[in-house]
Amino acid sequence: MRTEDAKNHTSGRVRLRIVLLAETFTPKMGYSENMLSKYLARLGADVHLVANDLRPYYQLPEYGQIYSTFHDDPPKANTVEKIDGFTVHLLSHIRVLGYVRMRGLFSKLLRLRPDVVQCSAAIGWIPLDAALMKPRFGYKLFTANHTHASVFPLATRDTPWWNREKIRCLLTRAIPGRLVSIQTERCYSISEDCAEVATRFFGVQRSKSTVCELGVDHERFRPIRREAGAAERAQLRSRFGWTDDDIVCIYSGRLTEDKNPLLLAAAIGRMFRPDQHGYRGLFVGAGPQAERISRQAGCTVVPFVPVEQLGAYFRSADIGVWPTQESLSMIEAAACGIPIVINHTVSTRERIDGNGLTYLLGDVEDLTRVLRQLGDRDLRQAMGECGARRMREEFSWEKIAKRRLDQYRFALDGR
């Protein structure tokens, strides 16, 4: 930290300058770097988010089929914009050894002179460059890991140490990751299994590994409290031809094989009765499964919506269902007051403690059974109220930002 700022900091008057480094910037989604930046800025920090000039999920083979109509034109490099109280800087990029690297990061950090740098990942060129530049600038470096075991095959396989994939992981992830970890104060993983992946495969030292769950922006994701919220719900349900007696199951995210929302559509198709009220499915997203989902009886597919509008869709539904992988939408839906259904292998059980149920992964019959169990309105209401309360008390970006700011200050104080 700069000498002048250090004096102000010890007297409690400093305005910390925090730089968050992310591979991409996603203004239409409520991702962690956006939300953490927003709430750190509200707490008085001078916050700058630096990202590449790339669209979110640019690396997906099915990008065009999933996101081409949702995201705006490619971001322009070397632009600066103020959003939600923080400043967004977009840099151009190059590819080195097949991976994306920021161009001009050194110059940007030289101009910004941050007290704290927070990376959104623990491995890759961004955290490695930030670690290499740390001695020059003297900031405190923090990283994060969002990679669940469910999407990292080595974490779920029993393989010998000489396995080719394991050796490649050691050379390309663990060793560079350890170099980053040595320069890091803490690595924040969003769940216990993410923390295990970080320490086993990404070189993060266990002594520097911390679990910090994702948060919810409660200004956007909240239960129905007033008449206006009830009217909004009724209007959306009417738009899709549903009545108050229908039980609407919602999924939001990519409509792809790895997420497999088609399984939910198949369960809805089994329970759908055209001549009576019953189960309906709402799928917010796009992808290869979209056409097959829309052909299932009782199922409706709508395109992705910006994060500002997503809460209204959750509040219009009765049950949130994510059949395979973890999703930020789970806790956002729970914050809106609806129960959650996930599969039995998901490690983030804290997201459904008292406010959700599990089904056997890939078993449409068992998913149907669980959804029928939630046909009880009183049970849904009790679970929904529990979820909304827990998300407010335990999964709040405002509270996470306060803790994070304290931890940044402790690191700067040398504690």
Image: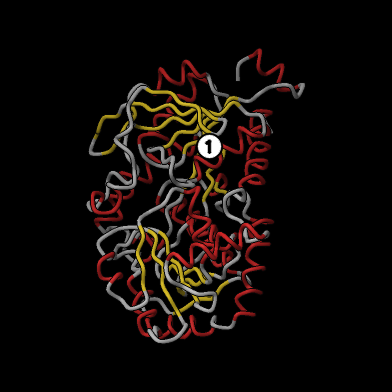
Task: Let me know if residue 211 appears in the view.
Answer: no
Task: Let me know if residue 13 appears in the view.
Answer: yes
Q: Is residue 360 above or below residue 89?
A: below
128 or 273, which lies in front?
Answer: 273
Q: Residue at x 44, y 36 (%)?
A: 180
Specify how the rendered protein is coloured.
Answer: secondary structure
397 sits to left or right of 302: right
Quadrant holding the C terminus: top right
Question: Image quarter for residue 264?
Answer: bottom left
Question: Image quarter for residue 383?
Answer: bottom right
99 or 74, which lies in front?
Answer: 74
Which residue was labeled with disc 1?
142
Q: Residue 362 location, x and y as percent?
A: 36, 77
Q: Residue furthest top?
A: 4
Disc 1 is placed on an element classified as: strand
Q: Residue 164 location, x and y as percent?
A: 24, 56
Q: Is residue 387 above or below residue 244?
A: above
Q: Residue 29 location, x and y as percent?
A: 45, 46
**Label 1: few (<14), some (14–19) or many (≥20) C-alpha neighbours in 10 Å:** many
Quadrant holding the N terminus: top right
Q: Amino acid at mark 1?
A: Phe
Q: Residue 171 location, x and y as percent?
A: 31, 44
Q: Residue at x 63, y 61 (%)?
A: 224
Q: Residue at x 66, y 29 (%)?
A: 44
66 or 91, which lies in front?
Answer: 66
Count the marks.
1
39 sits to left or right of 136: right
Q: Residue at x 43, y 23 (%)?
A: 80
Q: Is residue 146 above or below residue 379?
A: above
